[in-house]
Structures are given as structure tokens and as C-alpha cells.
Image (cartoon, grey):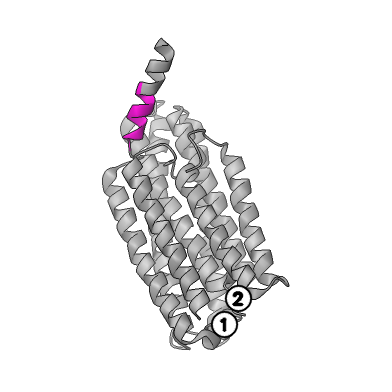
Amino acid sequence: MHGKAENSGIEGARLAVIPGDSGVWVFIFADMCAFAVFFLLFSVGRVAQPELYEAARQQLDLQLGLANTLILLTSGAFMAAAARTARAGNVQGTLHNLLLTLGVGSLFGLSKAVEWSAKFNHGIGLTTNEFFTYYFVFTGIHFLHFVIGLGVLLVLIARVRDISVQGGAMDGASLRWIEAGGAYWHMVDLLWIVLFAMLYLMRAA
Amino acid sequence: MTGTREWPVWAVWTVLTGTSLLGFLLAEGQAPAKVAATAAILLAAVKIHLVFDHYMELRWQHRPLRQMLAVWLAVVTVILLGGYWAA
């Protein structure tokens, strides 16, 4: 009975907790709402010109789109593992997982560079048509978020490395940083999941 | 949401990867276009739900935030499906 009551108390406390920092979540939600407006603009454009959107979609490289998705999901898995190891107080494990998050995640930048340069080499650019205007603007803004995410990861790695070098323990502030940085990195994942489905996979009849 | 139990990270990754491959194969394959596109959007919604619950760790935390994100996901899914079926 005592154990059950204690667990209920912990559960109740956890239900009120936001991982990381509430300010980060306000930013994340506002950003996600901005992207929802982008998705609405794209859908309205698609209704007006379905043939143009389908012809343009067929010029995208689905294999690279899938590769981008798998890269971000794998990097996100290491980020989730980093948050769990940090919560367990495992400094070395956290550093290891953060480095893997950064390493795997960086491949997304390489993949996007290959994809965009192939488009430019085929004479496809921002002004080719409405579909490609949205394609470059949306994936470009998403890429900017990705670059900011890499910066956040570098800050987290430096912080955890300092703890490791000093032989210290994971403190509450560092854990909140990792959770907040992780939430941001996962937002980059989930926005790409929508972009991949919307731009690459919605084949017209 | 998907309950309070913490899934192993590799299990979440496996489901996310599997649903990504399924959406890709449907889009590339011989499935009717409307079926493939609708499935791709619904699979994306499932993946985002899993990211909320298991990567962002919101499955048992802060109900108002979870509800806001669930509303966002519902709105985005309706926008994409509505736009596709109206075209």
C-alpha cells in the first residue's frame, strides 16, 4: 500500500513535468504552427494545380527522401538514448550517444546537399514552378532548423564533456539542457516526416 | 497516447523505420495512388505520434502539452488528406 501510494505521488508529479524547459516548448509549438500554415499553403496550391504538382513530384528523388528520413530517425533514436542515459546519471553513455546523434545527423546535411545540387544541375530552381518554390522554401527553412540543431548538439556535447573531464556527476541543469535540446532535435525529425509524406509520397491518381 | 510504459529506444526506431519503408514502398509500388497517398499520410501521423510519446517523452507528462500537440497533429493530417482528396 505504501509503495502504491508513493508511486502514485511520483506519477502525479511526473504528469505535471515538461521535459526540458517550458520556454523551449513554447518555441517548438509556435514553430510547428508556422509549419502547419506552410502545409496549408501547399495543400491549397495542390488543389488548384494537381497536374503540375504531380509532374513536379515525379522529379524528386524518393530514395534520397527516404534516406533523409532514416538518417533523422536514427539520429533521433540516439538523442532519445542520450536523454535516458543522462537521467540514469551515466555521463560517458550520454556523451557517447550525443556524439552519435551529431555524427549520424550530420549525414542529413550531406544528403540534402547532394539532392539540391542534383536539382540545380537539372536546371530546377526556386522559380521553376510553384511546387518547387514551396519545395525549396520549406526544405530550406527546415534545413535552417537542422543547422541550429547541430549547434545545440555541439553545446550539449561540450557541456557533458566538461562534466566527464572533471569527473563530475550529471546535474539537474545539464539534464534539463539535454531534454530541451532533445525536444528541439525531435521537432526537426517530425517536421521532416510531414515534409517527406507531403512532398515525395503523395502520388496523384 | 500509447500508455505509460517506456519502450526500448531500438523498438521505437524499428517501428518508425518499418512504417517509413512501408510508406515508401506503397508510393513506389503498384498500389492505387489514392490508397498509397492516404496510407503515407496516416503512417506519417502514426510516426509523429510515436515521436511525441517516445522520443520527446510526452507519453505520461504534462497533459495540456500533449493535448496541444495532438490537436496540431490532427489539424495537419486533415489539411494534408483534405488537400489530397479535394485535388
- Residue A68, picture quadrant: bottom right
- Circle 1 residue: A54
Label placed on residue B10: none
Name the spot of residue A197 as percent of width and height, x first: 54, 67
Name the spot of residue A183 as percent of width and height, x first: 40, 47
Does A187 sit above or below residue B76? Answer: above
Q: Residue at x 33, y 62 (%)?
A: A33
Considering depth in this image, is A114 or A179 the residue closer to the camera? A179
- Circle 2 residue: A203
Q: Chain of mark 2?
A: A
Q: Residue at x 47, y 28 (%)?
A: A90
Q: Amino acid at mark 1?
A: Glu
Name the spot of residue B79 as percent of width and height, x first: 43, 69
- Residue A65, picture quadrant: bottom right
Does A9 sit above or below residue A57? Answer: above
Considering depth in this image, is A163 or A79 the residue closer to the camera? A79
SS at mark 1? helix
Label 1: how many Cα within 10 Å (few below 14, some 14–19, many 20+): some
Q: Chain of mark 1?
A: A
Q: Residue at x 34, y 51 (%)?
A: B68
Name the dominant secondary structure of the magenta segment.
helix
Task: Report if residue A171 is visible in the image.
Answer: no
Whether residue A14 appears in magenta in the rendering, the answer is: yes
Whether pointer 1 and pointer 2 mark residues with C-beta atoms closer than 8 Å, the reply is yes
